[in-house]
Image (cartoon, rainbow, N blue to C red):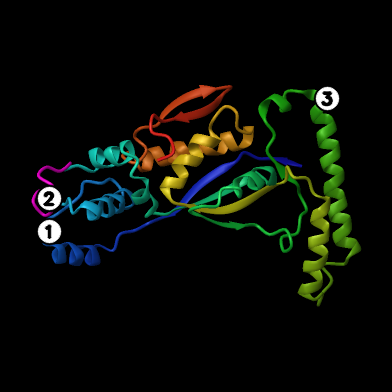
Amino acid sequence: MKLVEPKVFLVGETRIIEDELHLYLDHLGVAEWTSDAPSDAEKIIEVMGRRCYRSFKPGLNPNVTKIREHNDEYLQNIVRVKHGSVIEHPMLNFIIADVSRVFTHELVRHRIGIAISQESLRFVRLEELRMWIPKWALEDKELMERNIDLVERMEKHQVWMAEHFKLDEPGKPFHEKKKKTSFMRRFAPDGLATAIGWSVNPRALRHIIEMRTDPGAEEEIRLVFGKIAEKVKSRYPNLFADYTLEMVDGLAWYKTPNPKV
């Protein structure tokens, strides 16, 4: 048994194709328009939002005589008036590692604006069982002695089954390995550490951060989304500027006066 800590990696994000955007702006008659957005994700939200009202400059739409010139004030207004649809345009790509299948079972309940690719235990054979355990449980000596004994017996059973099924025998057909590996996962705990690829649009992410850092949420998911919130507030400061942080029971609670945008 090996203890692990959940980890969050932001591995991808929407990128603007500048040449094509410039062609569009020229087509619209605002070739001189620029944005001071700190990221492409925030810039594409601004572009799509301004597209809705033709508010790239005063007079482009006769009804618009004044515009918000900076990305931060523009996005803050988008959030404030709950024009959430334009926040759906970018995608942020995460890999979340060393989280339990308890966590992933909860995570996959969020489906709108989400793409998911999870490690498959039909194909990935288990040997060492890795898991995250909260600090309060680690401090309970008798509890941990029993936990470690139980998990180590399960580890040994995984190794025994692999030997019993002769999975490393030369020439063993892969379909046979897959069948037996799929059976073996039935004897692994839900607390087993795994990894999942998770892509999300910022509108969905804002809502999930609100839900999953709330003190009433499950402990591990609060920990992970506290890490995610910290990462996106740093990388997309204008988009998440309205979030404030409060610590509850040692975990982050991210709150906003603009919920459910």
Q: Does residue 244 show up magenta in the picture?
A: no
Residue type at numbered disc 1: Val
Q: CA distance from mark 3 to mark 2?
A: 68 Å
Instruction: From this view, report whether residue 160 is shown above or below residue 226.
Output: below
Residue type at numbered disc 3: Glu
Q: Can residue 226 be spotted in the picture? A: no
Look at mark 1 in the image and give the residue it sits on. 30
Q: Is residue 255 left or right of residue 47?
A: right
Q: Which residues are magenta?
A: 58-68
Horizontal and vertical percent position of residue 249: 58, 22
Tag 3's secondary structure?
helix
Horizontal and vertical percent position of residue 226: 51, 35
Nearer to the camera, 248 or 150: 248
Q: CA distance from mark 1 to mark 2?
A: 8 Å
Dividing the picture into quadrants, the one containing residue 174 is: bottom right
Residue at image coords 39%, 32%: 243
Tag 1's secondary structure?
loop
Q: Residues within 10 Å of mark 1 (few under 14, many from 20)?
A: some
Q: Is residue 6 left or right of residue 167?
A: left
Dividing the picture into quadrants, the one containing residue 221 is: top right
* For marks 3 and 1 on the same chain, the one whose residue lies earlier in the sequence: 1
Look at mark 3 in the image and give the residue it sits on. 142
Viewer-nearest of labels 3 and 2?
2
Q: Are marks 1 and 2 in contact (CB under 8 Å)?
A: yes
Residue at image coords 27%, 51%: 49
Nearer to the camera, 6 or 45: 45
